[in-house]
Amino acid sequence: MMSTLVQIFKIKELRNKIFFILGVLVVYRLVAAIPLPGVDFDQLQRFFDSNQLFGLLNIFSGGGLSNISIVLLGVAPYITASIIMQLMTTIVPRLEQMYKEEGEAGRQKFNMITRWLTVPFAMLQSFGMISLLRSQQVLTSVSTFDTIAIVVTATAGTVLLMWIGELITEKGIGNGISILIFAGIASGLPTMVSHAWADFDSTKLFTYIIFLAIALITVAGVIMINEAQRNIPVAYAKRVRGDRTYGGGSTTHLPLRVNQAGVIPIIFAVSLILVPGMVASFLMQSSHEKVSSIASQVNALFQNQMFYGALYFILVVLFTYFYTAVVFDPMKISENLQKQGGYVPGIRPGNSTAQYLYFIINRITLAGALFLGAIAVLPIAIQQMTGIQSLALGGTSILIVVAVVLDMVKHIESQLTMRNYDGF
C-alpha cells in the first residue's frame, strides 16, 4: 500500500492530476457552503428529518441542499437527464445508433444533448424546490424577483458542477460526477460521527459493537457484489484468410456482472415510493373533508416503517430487473458474437445463444436485486434493531462510496501499469 502511494507521487503527471482534483473538490465544497438568503435553518432541519426523499437528494447535491446553498440541486438534474437519455436509446433508434455505433464522435453528441437537457431540468427542479420549501416555511420573505434570482443561481450552480465533473473525468482518475457525489457523502461523515458521539450511551456499548460489525459486513458485501461477475466461455470458429487460419483454438469469456444496474434502481424506487406520501401531506391541508381524510390515511400508511420498508424492497427488485433489461440485450450480444464467428460451447449460435444469455442474466440479476433491496432497507432495519436514531447506516451512501473508490483505484492502477510498461 505504502509503496503504491510512493510510486503515485513519484510520477509527476499522475501527482499533478491528483492535486488538481483535490483543489477542484475544495472549490466545490466552498461553493456548497454559501447559503441563499432568507432561510430558516431550524425549520429546514426539521423538514429534512421528516422527509427521506430530500435526504437522498441531499446526497446528490453534496450537502448543498441541506443548507440551501447556491448549488442546492447539485448534480441531480444532470443525473435525471442522463437516466432519461439512457432510457430514450431504447425508444429512439437514432439515439441508440449515435451512442453505440458512431464511436467517440457519436458519444460526444449524445453527451452534448444530455448537457443541454440538464438546463431545463435544473430550472424546473429549482422552481419546484423553492415552492415546496416556501410552503414548509423554510424560505421566508421570498418575492417573485427573489424566486427568479434563486432559479437562475441554482441552474448556474448545476452547470458549474457539471463542468467541474467533466474536468475531473478528463484527468482519467475516475468519473467526475461520481467523485463529486462521493465528496458530498464524505463531507457529511464528521457531522454523523459527532451526532453519534453526542448521543453515546455507555449502557448500549454492545449495540454499538453490533452496529460497527454490520457496517463492516455491509462494506465487504458491497465490494463482493459490485465486483462479482459470471464468465460465459466463448470460442471462435476457424477462419481462413488467404494462406492463414485464424481462431479455432482461442477461447475468451463474456463477463456478466451481478449488479448491472448499479445504484439506479434505488434512485427510481425512492423517487416513486415517496411521491404518494408527499402528495398526501399537501392534500391533508385541503378544506374538503373527504380529501383531507383520505390523504391522512395514505400519509399514515406510508409513515408505517414495515409497510414502507416492504414496498421499498419490492420496488428496488423490480426496477433492478427493468434497468438490467434496458442496458443488457441478449439478442444483440448473440448477433454480434455470430458476426465475429464466436459461439458459446454447447449452445447453438443465434436465438439459442440469446435464450441462454437471458436465462443466465435472470438468475444472477436475482442475487443483485435482492442485495440492492437489502441495502435500500438497511437504515430502517438498523434503527428498528438498535433503537438509536443517530445510527443511520445509509446503504445507498455506502454503495456509492465503495463503487467510486473501486473505480478510482482501478484507474490509478491502470495508469501505473501503463507507466511501468513504458519504463520496462
Image (tube, helix red, strand yellow):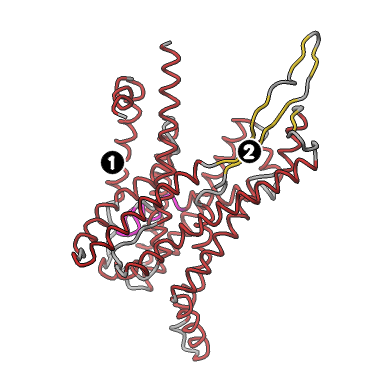
Quadrant of res 148: bottom left
Report whether residue 141 is seen. Answer: no
Which SS type dominates the magenta stretch? loop
Q: Which mark is residue 273?
A: none
Residue visible at 65% across and 51% down in the picture: 362
Helix, strand, or loop for circle 1? helix
Helix, strand, or loop for circle 2? helix
**Magenta stretch contains residue 70:** yes
Residue 46 relative to residue 349: left or right = left
Report whether residue 129 is seen. Answer: yes
Indicate whether 61 appears above or below 421: below
Residue visible at 43% across and 48% down in the picture: 400
Indicate whether 237 appears above or below 278: above
Which residue in the structure is indicated by mark 2?
Answer: 99
- Which residue occupies the foreground of this view, 96 or 322? 322
Of pointers 1 and 2, the one earlier in the residue sequence: 1
User: In the rendered structure, which amino acid carries the disc numbered 2?
Assistant: Tyr
Residue visible at 79% across and 19% down in the picture: 239
- Image spot of residue 403 (x, y percent): 44, 43
Indicate whether 22 appears above or below 211: above
- Image spot of residue 180 (x, y percent): 38, 44
Residue 87 relative to residue 41: left or right = right
Quadrant of the snapshot with the N terminus? top left
User: In the rendered structure, which amino acid carries the disc numbered 1?
Assistant: Val
Q: Which residues are magenta?
A: 63-76
Which residue in the structure is indicated by mark 1?
Answer: 26
In the image as oriented, which residue stretches furthest toward the front? Answer: 206
